[in-house]
Image (cartoon, grey):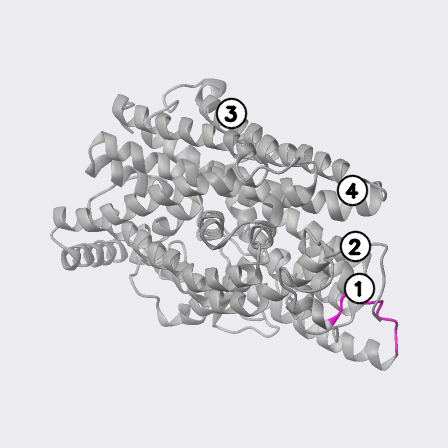
Amino acid sequence: MSDVSTVAFSVFIFFFLLVTILGFAAARWRRAEALDHLDEWGLGGRSFGTFIAWFLIGGDLYTAYTFIAVPALLYVGSGIGFFAVPYTIVIYPLIFLFMPRLWSVSHRHGYVTPADFVQGRYDSRPLALAVAFTGILATMPYIALQLVGIEVVLQVMGIGSETANWFVRDLPLFIAFGVLAAYTYASGLRAPALIAFVKDTLIYIVIFVAILYLPTQLGGWDSIFSSVSDNFDAFNTENADAIAAGEAAPKSVIPAPLLHWAYASLALGSALALFMYPHSVTAVLSTRQRSVIRRNAALLPAYSFLLGLLALLGFVAVAAGVAVENPQQAVPQLFENEFPDWFAGVAFAAIAIGALVPAAIMSIAAANLWTRNIYKAYLRRNATPSEEAQQSKWASLLVKFGALAFILLVDVQFALDFQLLGGVWILQTFPAIVVGLYTRWFHRTALLAGWAVGMIYGTWTAWNNPKLGDPGSHFGSPLDPFLSVPWSDTFLPFDTLVYIGFTAFLLNLVVTVVLSAILRALKVPSGVDQTTPADYHADLGDKGVEEELDPYTTTSHP
């Protein structure tokens, strides 16, 4: 990497200071009487309208790691690299249908987390704990990957890359997350909501400029795609023996036939998982009306269009001759090579700020799960709203610094592997949450058993999936032959590769359906439902008092 550019560094610092000021100022923005309630600190007062929610949810879902990882897949010639684009399109019609129902029932009963809803709906402490545990477990590596995004930018900028002293090398990272921790503690969800305006504006500017300017310097899109095709063909020819031996993957622009189902299942599985993540639910529950969610479901595909343009930068980096050992550095290095220092500084700031917004929301969401569904449910049943808010603030600090320690002490590849598993894990909560919004036919014990089967199968299969050229390694790919069994090559093997999380999800559903039928036939008690049909259509201003109920103690509707 090159030496540090004073101009690029100055621009980077300017925007970092700007979002720091905004983060602390957010405590006074839409100011409440106090932030000593999870509705205020953890959900922004449940007051965000369409405009703010659009930036917040977009900033939450399209992260710094998205900015570098999606183009990196295309840079290395992954045939399924574009899967992120269709999955962010598929999900919005789905959330148009089910997310308003979750908002309504949560608004009526004061639910803060998806596990609150599960407890109220199914009257099952173990199932609610499983949902909360899964949410925290899947979120932690996601936060760590935001640090990876910042690290990549710092490496390309040349900050700390030449020193052997680990403290000096990682000091900018300490400062960034120290500031993030401070303003999140002080301002809660209002901080990332306000910063999201800056983050998303910068990203839109950077990507549109890059998409319009770079092709003019590289002979147009036809030349770019021809260059990419020639580059991939040359790689495949030079490495034909390694590819045939399974030691290297062929590069391609379009997925090979073997990967068609892999592409489809990865896109669909990821779409179903996206709004199961606690930070996605937190952003949705912060809105003031159910109509806000539907309007955003119609508007958020603009980010999917942006993501498609962003992905193309991976091909642009290939055509521009960007050569990096770490593919995640491809896009930042492209900006450093092709743009003036001042604009490269803007791009670096956009990526780094793109890490701070989702990291803040993720830490708040994980902290809310800990506070509501573990601390209050099992450790302090009589916790007051003020005690809940304070506990969540401290938990958010621990979550952030736990993610920081994870990145500093563990190999980055391990963090990437765990994020892969995070998608597999969080998808297993879909039946309890989404199906539960429409029916209670699934038995609570069957849902817990299905969740366990999906978790175990997905984790074990991913663990036993070696990396190319390294038979003894683990977590080699999110794909595996459909319904293969990790310890057997002869039971139900198929040549078709599919997303491991999707297969685990199907097994989860099968177990849940079969056990539900058996348990209901045996008339095993299914608990008491705290909700009513009208709760799923409630909106702001509807007649009746919105009540904050404790889902662990209140029962009302069998």
State yes or no: discs 1 and 2 in contact (Cβ < 8 Å).
yes
Find the distance from the CA under tag 3 to the CA under tag 1: 44 Å
Q: Residues within 10 Å of mark 3 (few under 14, many from 20)?
A: some
Q: Nearer the viewer, mark 2 or mark 4?
A: 2
The residue that disc 4 covers is 375
Q: Earlier in the sequence, mark 2 or mark 3?
A: 3
Secondary element at image label 2 = loop
The residue that disc 1 covers is 530
Q: Amino acid at mark 3?
A: Phe
Q: Check residue 419 for magenta coloring.
A: no
Determine if residue 487 is in view: no
Q: Residues within 10 Å of mark 1 (few under 14, many from 20)?
A: many
- Magenta segment, which residues? 523-532
Q: Earlier in the sequence, mark 3 or mark 4?
A: 3
Q: Nearer the viewer, mark 2 or mark 3?
A: 2
The x and y percentages for residue 31 are: 58, 37
Q: Amino acid at mark 1?
A: Gln
The residue that disc 2 covers is 549
Find the distance from the CA under tag 1 to the CA under tag 2: 9 Å
The residue that disc 3 covers is 174
**Residue sitting nearer the eye, 474 or 177:** 177
Residue at position x 73%, y 60% from top?
118
